[in-house]
Amino acid sequence: MALIKCVECGKEYSSTVKTCPNCGFVPSFRKCADCDCISSVKRGYCAFCGAVFDSDLIPVSSEETEEYYQTLKASLNSSQDADSYDGILRALASMEDYKDCPALLKEAEKKSNYLRAIALMDDCQSATDWKKARDGFAAAGDYEDSKELYASCDESFKELRYAELDELYKEAGSDKEKLKELVSGYGELGDYSDSPKRLTDIKKALNSGRNKVLKITIGSVAGVAILIGGFIGIRYLVTVGLPKHHLEKGIEAYEAQDYALAVDELTRAGSYDTAPKHLEEAQIALHYQTGDQLFNSGDYQAAIEEFTQAGEYLDSQDRIETCTLASHYVAGVSLMEEGSYEQALAEFDQCPRYEDTEDKVAEANYQWGMELINAGELNEGAKLLDESGTDEASDVLKSMGEEFVEQKDYESLVTMFRNIYDNSFCNSYYCYGQGMLAYNDQDYTTAEYNLNRCSGIGQADELYPECAYNAGLESMASGEFGNADLLFSKSEVQAKYADAQALEHVCHAEFLNSINDFPGAYEEYAQVPEDLEVDCFDIQGRRSMFTSDAARTAYMICGEHEATSNDTSVLDKGTYYQDGWELTYVYPGQSIEFSVKMNDDGTFDYTGTVTYYAFTEYSIISDYTEGEIMYGFIDLSHVKKFPKEYEIDSDTTLTFKDNKFTLHYKYVDHYAISFKYIYESKVVYKLDQ
């Protein structure tokens, strides 16, 4: 005796007891220990595998019984293979009277007989074959078109059987065994053709012992007609009846979207009527359907081949693209699970917008990055974590950055975060590492540049003013006054270093002087204290240059100065006469403009343009006297002060005296031997004090 567990309440009880003593459940079905087939407890053996049941019961719950029943029912609807029905029939038989199993069993037997008969029809060669097919349709009863096919098979059987008997009839003679075979054969044919008459004659011959009645003329009209008619009927069934049946079945299967069956039936229909056209359509649809099934099962390469065969059917071309993307995606996931991250990312690159590829790329970058970091490849790992873009990756990078900052491991900071420009906090950690390394090496320019870009990290804010101040001094020493000016102007630098503002004036002055803004430089140096000194630059030497009398004069010369007076005339001087014209007012637009730069040795570079008015053409009629604005250019280098006289060209001279410029212009035009024109201009430009 063994204990079994109740499938309803879970309590154990003896296998010899038919009812659960705890819940009262009475098992109606049991499971076969050999094949797991479910059978009624009334049966002594398994109808499926034939195993004999012993006394120990393997009970089955109501829920499992119902599930088994539904599976059998679904199998009946889906299967189109007669052989597969054998197991289903045996399983239904084991269920006995459960629900509608008896009715299902009968229906399944009909369908099984029908399918077997159909299969026999396709291969019929003899009367015996047609008889078997006919008997199959007889057993199928009223299933679908069984009755019509039964009639067709019966007709074919009788025609071929009659022909066979006719041959035997000719040679039977007095052979009693053959005569008995003829009796049996014509008896099967019933009233077909002259079978009744022949059957009667043969029986009489057997009874009377007379054999002459059996001698029939071979070429008799009746016999020939019967044979011809029989062969015509068989030919009709083979060339029209069966193909038509397969065509109809094929179209029916196509409409039901059972394309595999449709292809099979339409292939059997051969070239009958529209069968070839329907077959082509069914084959294309089957390729598409098969491709869809393969896609759903994950066999994307095979699916691509099927969709390719489907051509332009429905969305086959789109499905090919989808299969291709899915193939890359699945390959990427598989490679990622194997740890082949580089190859996985290459696959994901081929399907960037497929499903959650972006998430998979992020995951692959993260896992690969962590693997590289753990292997000591800090920079490559950090780049991959940054590329991952996940919050988890950011947390790892920040945590490692803070750890290196606390440990003052500046080399690791620089190594890990190098060239990660698009990530602000990664770049900040890199700059902090570079800045601290430069600070320790007293490279203040590099330190300032980097620490200015990582505010809030480590000692960056604390050390920045010191680095900026010293970087300013380094810039002064190298003549980079614009950069030094910017550094000394920073509020945090001026808050810590008392002379930073004064140094700002020095650097700003030198920068302005370098771009020929001497007045601005002159004014900046005026604000520099007399006692300001640094080791890297001679501040007082430069200050004395910018505050000298020469500098004061240069300061006054700079800029634009308008003409305050002019004496412009033309003289027509002949051998015995002279006449002329003189401009009596200051002609507008006359000016002189200078820019000045002081050199390192205290000398000056002057560049300027003077604009003045002069007569150029003359007529004895004064109204027609014409003049024009003319230009002169000044370019002096490395002079201690502006000279008293400067020759602009052969006709023009500029003099400087008492803080004013005077331009002298004289041009003689020897128009003829007997007279000449003399053009003169004298323009005064007074400087502003």
Image: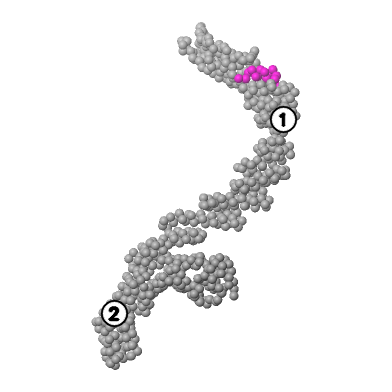
Residue at 44% x, 66% y: name it: 78
**Viewer-closest of 669 and 158:** 158
Type of the residue with mark 2: Tyr
* Any part of residue 145 in sight: yes
Residue at 71% x, 35% y: name it: 462
**Viewer-closest of 517 and 92:** 92
Region rendered in magenta = 545-559
* The N terminus lies in quadrant: bottom right
| Magenta segment includes 333 | no
Indicate the secondary structure of the residue bearing disc 1.
Answer: helix
**Viewer-closest of 96 and 250:** 96
Question: Which residue bears the numbered disc 2?
Answer: 192
The answer to which image quadrant residue 437 occupies is top right
Question: Which residue bears the numbered disc 1?
Answer: 496
316, above or below 477, in the image? below
How would you classify the magenta stretch by its main secondary structure?
helix
